[in-house]
Amino acid sequence: MSITILPALPTEAATITPIGVLAFANDVFNARLAKPNGTPAQHEEYLQWRIRRNERRMAKPGGTWFKAVDAETGEVVGCTGVQAPGPEEGEGEANGEVQEAEPEIFNGEFMREWHEAMEKVRKECMGERQDYWYVVSMVVHPDRQGKGIGKRLLEKDCELADAAGQDIYLEASPAGKKLYLNAGFEVIGEKSMLDGAAAVTAMLRKARPVVA
């Protein structure tokens, strides 16, 4: 299997979003974003809402997105996005959060609780710093996980930060923590959620010299 890493565009959100849905189907946080027992029509409404949200997020100024493509079939099998340093914009349309009505099966209350935990741990760990890159998203199709694709996508994010001589930060899910540790990220903080059953983990990778 030959994988090529290429730039990803906002217009590809309809292709990329379903990969994320599958990749995080069993994630302790993402699994709570859709209320149980929804109808097929409600799940489709939710998917289309997520596609529109991701399209806005991918179009955000300062962001760079990459996709992993199977060179033999042309299938997109993974994606990552990284945001260049700058002031935090908080929630709202500029940050990729849709302002349209939430889908009926969407658990908006939990989403806001989750985002609040991420913002708190970031503030606790990074303070007023605005000189670091931020990994917005990292997804690999479950059928292609464990084959080094996530590592290659993350390397592209880190290359941008290293070229700028700046650190790179993210909040890891329990499932993604190992990938980031192997890439040189260090745990700098945690925020417990779900009555202690899981935690949002803040991780940082210091800038590394670029080898010519």
Image (spheres, rainbow, N blue to C red):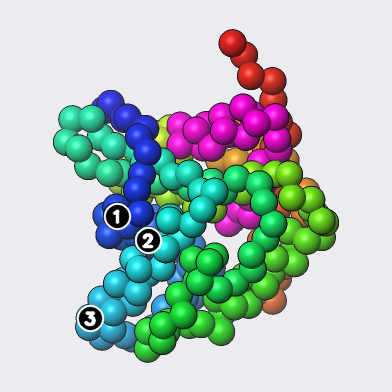
Q: Mark 2, residues whose alpha carbon is within 10 Å: few (<14), some, or many (≥20)?
A: many
For disc 1, the marked residue is: 11
Question: Where does residue 82 sit, x and y in percent of width and height?
Answer: 54, 46
Query: Viewer-proximal residue, 70 or 101?
Result: 101
As shown in the figure, which amino acid type bears the numbered disc 2?
Answer: Glu
The image quarter containing residue 92 is: bottom right
Q: Residue at x 59, y 72 (%)?
A: 91
Mark 1 secondary-structure assignment: helix
- As measured in the structure, the alpha-carbon distance from the residue carrying label 2 to the one carrying label 3 is 23 Å
> Viewer-proximal residue, 69 or 89?
89
Q: Is residue 90 left or right of residue 57?
A: right
User: 49 above or below 15?
Assistant: below
> What is the magenta range?
151-176
Q: Which residue was labeled with disc 2?
A: 55
Q: Residue at x 25, y 35 (%)?
A: 70
Quadrant, the C terminus: top right
Residue that numbered label 3 is attached to: 40
Depth order, front residue of 167/173: 167
Marks 3 and 1, Cα distance to the nearest angstrom? 25 Å
Q: How many marks?
A: 3
Q: Quadrant of the N terminus?
A: top left
